Image: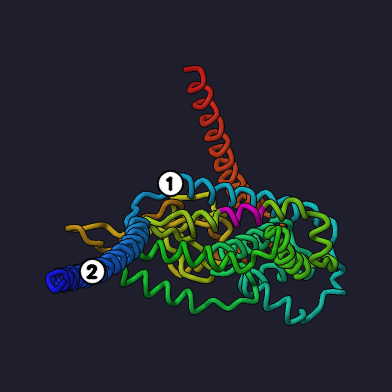
Amino acid sequence: MQEKYWRLEENLRESQRELAKQHDTHRKQASALAEAERRAAALRSERDNANMLLKTRTEELRAAEVYLTKTDAVSDADVRRMVESLNAEIYQSAALIADTCQDQWRNPNDTPAEYPQAIYDRLVRYAGHGIIQLLRQADGRVDSIQIQIALQCSISSYAHDLVTRWSLDPNENTDVLGRVYNQILRKEPQAVTGRWRMLTRQYTRALTKDVPDMASFLMPQLAQCIADVLFVAGIPWQSWETVSRNHGERLKGLVTMMLDLRNTIGEYAVASHFELIMSLGHEFDPTTMEDGFGEAKHALPDPDTRVLCTTELGLRRWERVSAKGKDGEWTVTVALKSKVVLDSITAELAPEKAETPGRHRGARAMAGSISKTVQGEVQHLVDEDLTKHLQLII
C-alpha cells in the first residue's frame, strides 16, 4: 500500500514538472509571438512610410518633369500668323465701319466744345491725345481715312490690353501679378518663368468660369471703344448697343481671335516669352516699327518724328540662351514689326490739303500692306490643305 502511495506521489511530481515545462514553453511562445507582432507592426509602418514617400517623390518628379519641358506646343510661325490674321481682321473691320459712317456726319454747329469726361478718358487710354486732335481738326467733318486710322489704333490697343492683361475681369486689379512676373522673368530660369505664367493665366481665367461665352461678355467693351471714336469724329451719337447691333458678329469674331492669341502666348508658349509690340507717343524705332502710312518703306522718318499710334501689332520673342547647362542672357527676336502712323500725318491730312493728289497715298500703302498679309495667310492655308491632300494620297 505504501509502495503504491510512493508511485502516485512520484507521478504527481513528474506531472508537476511536465506542467511547469509546458508553462515555460507557453511563456516563451507568447513572448515570441508578441515580438513577431511588434516586428510586423514595424514592418507595416515602414511599408506605409515607403508608399507615402514614393507617392510624394512621384508627384515631385511629375512636377519637375513639367518644368523640364523645353518644347512648346506652338511654333513661332504659328504665333506670327495669328498676329498677322488679327491685324488683317482689324483693318477690314475698321475700313468697313469707317465706310458705313461716311454719310452720317453731325452738324458742325452741334459739335460739342467739350466731350464727356468718360469718353475722353477712354479714348485717351486706347488711342492717345494725338488721335483726338486728328479727329477734331476738320471742324466736325473728318475724312473716312482718319476714322479708319483712329479705329485701327483703338481696336489694336484694346487687343494689346486684352492679350497682355492677367485677368479677363475688367474690374480685377492684377498689377501686382505683372510686377511679380517681371521679377521672376529677371531672376528665374525660363522653365520656371514660363510655367508660372501658364499656371497663373489658367487659374485667373478659372475665376471667370461663370461666364459661359467670354467673347460675348467682352464684346461690349470693344463696341464702346468704337462708339467713342465715332462720337469724337463727328458721327451722330451711337451707343455701344448700336455698334453691337450693326457690327456685333464681326466684333465678336475679333474678340475671339484676341482670346485665342492670348491663350496661345500666355498658356501654351512656355519655352519662350512672346510680347506684342504696341507704341503710342514714343519715338520711332526702325528696329521694331514700320511707317504704315508712308509709301517709302525703306526711308527713315525725321528723327524728331514721334509715333501717333499703332495700326498693326508687332511681335517680339524673348528667349534665354543656355550656356554650360544654365540659362544665360535674354535674346530678343523681332518676329513681326508693328505698323505705326507718325504724328506728321496730322499736317498731311489737314483740311487745307483735302484736295491734294497725295492725300490718300498713305491709305493705299496701308491697304497694300494688309492685302499682302491676307494673301500670305490664304496661300498658307492653301499650301496646308494641299499638303494634307498629298499625305492622304500617299
- Mark 2 lies on a secondary structure that is helix
Residue plotted at (42% across, 57% down): 316
Amino acid type assigned to the residue bearing label 1 in the image: Ser
Question: Is residue 167 magenta-colored?
Answer: no
Instruction: Write down the quadrant of residue 110 in the picture.
Output: bottom right
- The stretch in magenta equals 254-260
Which percent across, then down, holds residue 10?
A: 13, 71
Instruction: Write down the quadrant of residue 328 in the picture.
Output: bottom left
Magenta span dominant secondary structure: helix
Q: Which mark is residue 75?
A: 1
Q: CA distance from mark 1 to mark 2?
A: 77 Å
The residue at which mark 2 appears reads as 26
Which residue is most to the front?
A: 1
Which percent across, then down, holds residue 384?
A: 52, 31
Is 170 situated above or below 366? below
Q: Which mark is residue 253?
A: none
- Mark 1 lies on a secondary structure that is loop
Question: Is residue 258 magenta-colored?
Answer: yes
Q: Nearer the viewer, residue 254 or 103?
A: 254
Report crowding for label 2: few under 14, some 14 to 19, many 20 or more residues within 10 A (C-alpha).
few
Horizontally, is 145 left or right of 384 in the view? right
